[in-house]
Structures are given as structure tokens and as C-alpha cells.
Amino acid sequence: GFLAPEPRRYSADASRRRSASSQNHSSNPNRDSPEETLEQRVERIKRHLLANVITLDDSAVKTIPMRRRQSRTDEDHESIENSEGGEEAEEGNASSSVGDLWKRVKRSWMNASFLRRTIFLISVVLLFAAVVILVVLFGTTNNSTTKIDHSTPATYEDPCDSIGDELSQLEGDATIRWEISLGIISSITPEHVLFDETSPQGKALRWIVCHDAISANFLNQHNDQKSNVQNRDANLSQPSLSKRTQTTTGYGFVNSGNSSKSQVLRRYILATLYYSTSINGPWYDDWNFLNGNEHECSWHKIYKRWNFQFGEVDPAGIVCQTGPLGDILLNDEEIMVGRLIVNFRIKNNLTGTLPPELGHLVDIGNLLIEQQKHLTGSLPPMMPSITLLESVGILFNGPDFGGEIPKSLLELPSFTYLTIKQNAGSWSLPDNVDRISPNITNLDLSTSGFRGTIPRWIYESNVVVLDLAFNEFQGPIFPEDEIIDFLPRIELLSYHGNRHLYGTLPDALGRLGGTLKVLALGNNQIGGSVPESIGNLSNLELLSLDDNAMTGTLPSSMTSMTSLRHLVLSSNSFHGSVTVLESMKNLTSVLIHSNEFSGELPGGIFDGVSSDSSLYLDVGINRFSGDIPSSYGNAPNLTFFGATRNGFENNTVDNITCDNVEFTIMDCSACSCCNVCCDPSDDLSSREICDFHMDSFRLLGLECGPWWMYCNEPQTYYDVDPV
């Protein structure tokens, strides 16, 4: 508890002064007497003041209120009695006089001890602070509530009045539609965003309420915002709607069902997508978006592509199917919709960002965005309720569209294919993914500005295609030898063109022999030699190690790589013989330009190759010697033969080779029959011929990723801009 105040101690001197004062001053000391001199008057007042003090100890004094004198004149008694009567009246009236109340408070304050004053002051400060906090909190809540209430169109006579007179064509109470729509849509979009008429979400909500006849057909049936929205199997037809809209009974969607609530939410999400991607103006073509009388499955435009691998019909916009590669549906009147595709592969002046509401589109199966040069932002997070999304394709988009791929996308159980290629923006991979989808097979992420180190979760996936070519990844090419064991299904592994990946090829690389078909690690900073275990890659069809810092000789185990079709070792420091190439009976491309290989060229490199395969041989800028094998001239379909800057014999190329090979580049001294040859002493144009070599990445179709083997075949090309 608190300390009790110290008891007052009265000194003897104070008692004597009070006694003398009562004897010598029976009258009012403030009244002047005509007989008194000035000195007497001062002495009298001094004695009066001393008579009205007390001392707490011998060294301290404190003033107290004036005491009543024992002897008073009649005038004094009358004055005192009036005063006392007034005080009693004030006490009976519960201290009605504010001035007297203040005097009493002041008197109590003066009499209180220092400790009590301090406690009192602290209590007052704390009480004041509590009041201020309550006022601020109440004011904020009140202001917020007032703002929402003021902004809510439900307070209007018609929430559509501010949008246009044409909207009054919809029947029913727009205010009721607003309240019901708000209750549905606020489950995915905050209300303060919906109340903003300028936001894409606010525009979409007002379109639902004021423009969308199909949504109005359902919403008008409910007069209570809290009521459950009925299924669409009820008879909800309206005479004012189009023939398609009158037929409202539908089978719905596999994932979201057939309730009108789910359809209102789906149409709101798609309307938000439109408004959010038309910030700087409308699309070139609306693709039938925001047609309030049509089912959302009809919000697309049919295009045709020549030689398109998925068929000549390519509908742009929202496409509904019965299932993967199933029939296209315009509505759900006769059959349930299996999934929905957002197909934005045709340039259409999309400006702005993909809204977060897109991550709530539970019926989406594919998201395809191509050639949208003015999109900004990144992919939105995906909700776990999205269980049908199988693939996302982002290609040929502009510099402001990028960012980190959401973890939530990679964790969706159904997710299988991610393609982000040939984009001008900068993208990145998340460092950690908690539950990588077990169904992910394709990560085709080339030429899109990816940076950082290759995250470990990639190796822990079941990926079949891993294409990270032409990005800006850095760090060790394989951070741990055993990490290769996490790629049990890998078929294509391409890190080509990152330039900052370093390290050596581990001996564990041979453990990928059961599945690996393409290993493209060119244009990096890989050192060391080719491991002997590479011979275990018996199914490997393409090996590309060009433009690195590798050394050593070709291991003898490579004779076991009988499935190898393309070998690219250009621009390294390999040396020694290349006789192991004769054992690879399926080789069609041997590109070993700019090394230190020596000896004679083996004559049986292309023995056993089928006559319909185009052959490429580039051995320029090495230390080969001797004669050019005559078998090269007889090889079927030898399209290119380059052998500049070596030590071959003079005139070693015969006329058969010149006649049968489509394009030959040799030193002029070695080939008298060549129309184009290399003379190092000649002008600049000749020296450029001497340094010419094949671009293996494009030659072999690696730019097409998993489609590399078909990339250069004519039937795979199609018109980018369909009609």
C-alpha cells in the first residue's frame, strides 16, 4: 500500500502565538483604528498573520485557512452567520456553485501531501489518456462505417443511376441485386475495393448488377441478402431476356456445381479480368466479353490457324470443354462443363495486370497468355480450391510482365505443365516450395530472364522436361552429386546459354541413363573432362557441351552410346583422337569446331545412317591432318561439311564430295573444286568464311524445348496471326 502521512506536530511557540493573538485582537485586524500609528498597525497585522500558521517541525511552516476569532463584533457575527448559512445551503444543494466547489477542491489540494498529489496527477493523466484512446478508436470505427454506408449503393434509390440510362432495361430491384451480389462477391474481394467505382472490381460488380441479364435473372428471385441462392434447376425464366437466357436450367460445371451463386461469381471474375486488362483502353476485339445475354462459355471468337497442331480452330477468349481435348461447349444446357480455358494467345491490346480474383476461378483448366506486349505485374496466387488447372503458358509477352512464380501454383495437385518462354520481362523461381505437385512433368522456362541459383525443389520433383536455357542462372551446375538421384524421370535437361553456371560434370551423371534423352549444357563455364560414366547414358540422343572450358579426351565408354544422334562439343579445349565416333551408328550431327582434336578423320562416321536424315559435319579449327575420307562424298544427304583451318593435304577433297555435299567450306589449299573456300591471307570476307560454324542450338531445334526433334520440320510451323 501507500505510506501513511506523517502526523502533524505543533510547536510550543505556535501555541503561545495563537494565545497572544486571541487576547490582543478581539476585533477585525484589517480594520484601521484612528488612534493607531503606522508602526502599531504593522505590528498588529504581523501578529495576526503569525497567529494563523502552524509548524510541522522547527524549520518548516505551512499556511492554513484563517481561523475564526473568539471575540467578534456584532457586525462580524452577522457576517459570519450569513456565511455559514450560505455554506450549509450550498452543501444541501449538492455543491451547486461551481466556484465554491473549485475553492473546496483547491483547499483539499493544498492540504494534501506530496505523495497524494503525485498519485492524483498520475490518475488524472491515465484517465485522460484512456478517454483519448476510446475517442480515437470510436471515431475511426465510426468514420469507417460512415464511409462504407455512404458509399454503398444500397443507400441509393437505384445503384445503376450513376452508370447510364441504358441499364434500366433490366427488370427487378437493382438495390436488392446489389445487396445479394455484394454478399456473394465479397467472399473473394474486400468490400472497400468493390465500393470504389473506378477499380476493375468495382466496375465488374456494377456490370453484374446493372448490365448482366443472366445474373439478374437469378438475383431478382431473392429478396433477402442472407438467403441461400437456389440451384439453377428451378424455373427462373424472364420474358424480357433473350431466348438463350430464358433457358436457365443447366448442368453447371464439374468443379463449381450448378448453383446460380457460382455462376454469378464466375461471371464477376471474368468481368474483373476484362476491366483489369483494359486499363489504357478497350481490347482490339472484345471476344464477346461482357455479353450479358450470353453464357460465359460463349465469350470467345473463333480464329483459324494454318497447320495448327491442335486443329485449325483456335477460339480466343473463354473456352469451355467437356474435358481435356474435349468438345467445345457454348453453354451448359445439355451437358456439364468439364473445365474452362482462358485462351489469350492472340495479341489484343491487353493493358494492366491479371487481377487476384483470377486465382479464385475454380473451373480453370488452362491459362494461356501470348503476345500481350503491354501486360504488367505477375501471375496471381492460386487458391487450393483450383483442382483442375493443368497448364500455364506464358510466351512472347512484354517487358513489364514477370515476377516470381507463385508457390501456390506449383503446389496445386493437378498442375502438370509450366511454359514461360521468349518473354521480355524478368521472372524468378521461388526459393522454397513446401509441397511441389507430384504431377509436374514439364518446366519449360527458357529465354525469360530467370535469375539466381537453381532451387533444390526442382530436383526433388518428378519433372520430365527441365528447360532453363538462355536465362541468367548462376552457381554450381550440379550443387551436389547425389542431387541427380532426384531426377528419376528426366528426359530433357537443358541449361544451355546461362553463361554463369560453373563446376564439373559429376560421375553420378551416368545414373540418368535409364530415361535421359537430351543433355544440353552448352554456353556456360563448365570445366573438367567428360566423365567415363557418360557411357551409361544409353538412351541419350543429343549431347551438347559446346562453349565451355572443358578439357581432356573423349572417354572410350562413349562407344556404348549407340542411341546418340547429335554430338556438339564445339569451342572447348578437347584434344586427342575422335575414333570413338565410328562406333556411334546413329550419328547425324557431329559439331566439334574450335578444339584441339588431332589425327585423321574416321571414315565410317555416317555408316548405317538412314537415307532420309540430313547430316552435318563441322570439324573446323582443329589439328586434323591427312586426307578427307572419300566416304563423305558418298554419304546420303550430307548437308554441311566444314573443315577450315586444319592441316589436311593439298587438294584432298575430290570432285564427288564437291558435287554431292550441299554446302562445303574448306581451306582453299585443300579443295580446288570448292566454290567457297577459306584463304586466311585474303580480305575480311574470306576470313569470315574461315571462322564460320553452325549454330547448333537452332540447328538441332533446341529452341523448341521438348519439341526439339520436330522443330525444323515444316509441318510444325503455323501462322502466328490467324484469321
Image (spheres, rainbow, N blue to C red):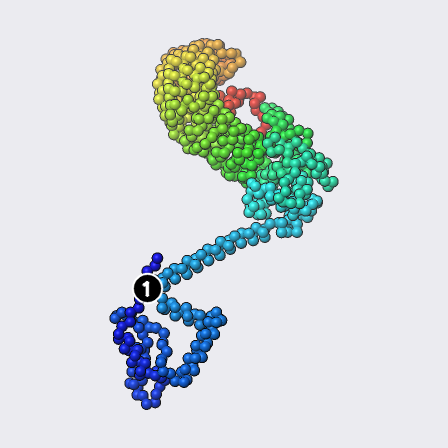
Instruction: Spot the residue most to the bottom.
Output: 35
- The residue located at (53%, 52%) in the rendering is 144
| Relative horizontal placement of residue 474, taking residue 264 as reference (left or right) | left
Of the 4 image quadrants, the one containing the N terminus is bottom left
Of the 4 image quadrants, the one containing the C terminus is top right
Quarter of the view holding residue 347: top right
**Between residues 32 and 715, which one lies in front from this camera angle?**
32
Q: Position of residue 567 (x, y in %)?
A: 44, 18
> Is residue 618 in view?
no
Q: Position of residue 574 (x, y in %)?
A: 37, 19
| Relative horizontal placement of residue 251, taking residue 669 as reference (left or right) | right
Q: Position of residue 174 (x, y in %)?
A: 66, 46
| Relative horizontal placement of residue 159, taking residue 636 as reference (left or right) | right
Asked if 291 appears above or below 20 in the picture, the reply is: above
Q: Which residue was labeled with disc 1?
A: 5
- The residue located at (60%, 41%) in the rendering is 184
Asked if 636 appears above or below 106 in the picture, the reply is: above
Q: Position of residue 547 (x, y in %)?
A: 40, 24
> Is residue 610 in view?
yes
Amino acid at pointer 1:
Pro
